[in-house]
Image (spheres, grey):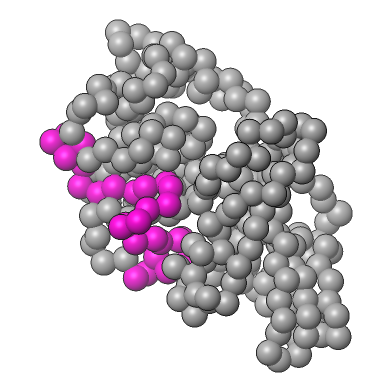
Amino acid sequence: MVKVGLNGFGHIGRLVTRAAFNSGKVGVVAINDSFIGLNYMVYTFQYDSTPGKFHGTVKAENGKLVINAKAKSKIPPTSSWRCGGAKRVIISAPSAYAPMFAMAVNYKKYNSLKIVNNALPSGKLWRDGLGAAQNIIPAFTGAAKAVGKVIPELNGKLTGMTFCVPTSNVSVVDLTCCLEKVAKYNDIKKVVKQASDGPLKGILGYTEDHVVSCDFNSDTHSSTFDAGAGVTLKNHFVKLISCSGDSWGLAPWSSLPTTQLDRTGELALADPESGLYI
């Protein structure tokens, strides 16, 4: 089992911890968050309105967070991960210096780098502070730029934006493409289905059911192709729709790379809500 330490116990950190317990392959041995107390860590881990209540035991005991009878040390924010034995760092946020890797996309290019990121791009804009329950809010997304980093062939060929809408969870990707070669929509669906059953199994989902956003709540796929929602125009202009469970879709793939990076060592996972310490 790979041992990891979490730097940040915000939404992503808590979901990564849940994913680690579910996998049985990753052991969380230490948690660092300078912004919240131990009792509040217990409460927020036990109860989360979006993915639901944690189905296990969690309590504070002797200054430690105890999950399913296993104690996790809460360490001071000044502690050095390097001195603690961390050999690798995965940053779950955009990074100006750490190369980006995505499972099933470019992870085979990894070559023993000490610090990498599998970013969940984010930005801060004034409009983000307006009432989310009353508005559809245009916002910045670094997703298109991130795609260019992990798939260089698409660098400069893709752009995008995002809308924040009054739903508690789940994101939709609306990809509009002008194809160089004519392709029927049924043929596109067939290729995506083959990928979801083959090399991208468990990462890319596929459905032909009449689904809505809540159906993807707590779905562990990075994204699920909605075959019934896409449209084409004369077989060279196509709109493809895919849904993801937001942070819960990211968390398992934040913990999984730890087993790929170092099967016997220790690793620190940096959370965007607290920054990177090493």
Nearest the viewer among 4 and 140 is 140
Magenta run includes residue 43: no
Q: Nearer the viewer, residue 140 or 216?
A: 140
Q: How far across and down, in percent of the image, does residue 172 sit? A: 71, 53
Q: For residue 52, what is the image quadrant?
A: top right
> Where residue 9 sits in the image (x, y, percent)?
42, 29
Quarter of the N terminus within the rendering: top left
Name the spot of residue 96 as percent of width and height, x first.
35, 56
Whether residue 219 can be seen here? no
Residue shown at 46% from the left, 42% from the top: 23
Q: Residue at x 44, y 68 (%)?
A: 149
261 displayed left or right of 225 = left
Q: Is residue 150 left or right of residue 159?
A: left
Residue at 23% in and 62% down: 112
Question: Magenta part of the protein: which range?
Answer: 81-109
**Residue that appears at 58% across and 43% down:** 125
* Direction from residue 126 to residue 37 in the image, left or right: left
User: Is residue 109 placed above or below 43 in the rendered structure?
Assistant: below
